[in-house]
Image (cartoon, rainbow, N blue to C red):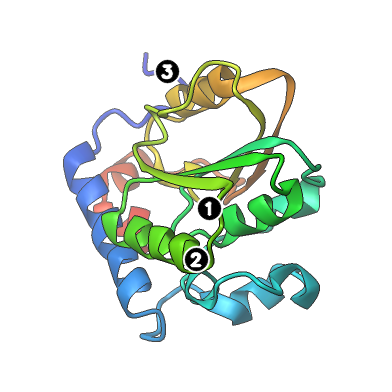
Amino acid sequence: MPEIGVVEDVDLARLRTAVRNEYAVVANQPGKGFHFHTGRPLAKLLGYSDEWLEGIPESAVESLAGTGNPFSLGEIRPGERVVDIGCGAGMDSFLAAKFTGESGSVVGVDMTPDMLGKARAAAEAANIGNIEFKEALAEELPVPDGWADVVISNGVVNLCPDKPRVFGELLRILKPGGRLQIADILVDKPVPEEAKTEIDLWTG
């Protein structure tokens, strides 16, 4: 019997390639128009205040593609260590860096090189020193055990076929008493087995 939360028959390499390709377009052509909301209009829909976004690199804001607002689940406090899973162009990572301040640290993790390139360029241009962006999978996080006070994520866990492995990694990197602040898609009906292997349904 398959483990709950694991999609076993999906072509993992093909799925990851499709996701990378989709979000490379969001990084490089943010105004193209997608089947999902993006950028500053999406930030407004999701409850990000103009005050929060003040000073956040516009290149990060314009390529926002998420499903919710992880900061609505709790404040990031000064001095905390934060990991952003599926950081994309970095808007949530830059917000976390703003909230935690110079005494804190933020690690943004993503598997799409185009998004990471955009995030790193924005951090360098804005001279933001308490943030680092790393290329990796949510299933294999390049973060030490018990490092993070808070793990945030915005619309990424739903794209991972092995959710128990992802949550195992999130719990591994959290300190005792640390916090998960995840915004994502939930379904209230079982997804048909045949639909789980359709790559277009994962990305669309």
Residue 180, labelled with which disc? Answer: none
Name the image quarter holding residue 148: top right
Residue at figure coordinates x 28%, y 55% from the top left: 113
Q: What residue is shown with label 2?
A: 65
Disc 2: CA contacts within 10 A as few (<14), some (14-19) or many (>=20): many
Q: What residue is shown with label 3?
A: 3
Secondary structure at numbered mark 1: loop
Q: Is residue 196 visible?
A: yes
Name the image quarter holding residue 139: top left
In the image, 202: left or right of 45?
left
Camera-side mark, 3 or 2: 2
In the image, 202: left or right of 179?
left
The N terminus lies in quadrant: top left
- The disc, 3 or 1, on the residue closer to the chain's N-terminal end is 3
Q: What residue is shown with label 1?
A: 155
Residue at figure coordinates x 30%, y 55% from the top left: 19
Cα separation between marks 3 and 1:
22 Å
Query: What amino acid type is highlighted by mark number 3?
Result: Glu
Please say if the residues under marks 1 and 2 sit with CB atoms less than 8 Å apart.
Answer: yes
Cα separation between marks 1 and 2:
8 Å
Name the spot of residue 145 as percent of width and height, x first: 53, 16
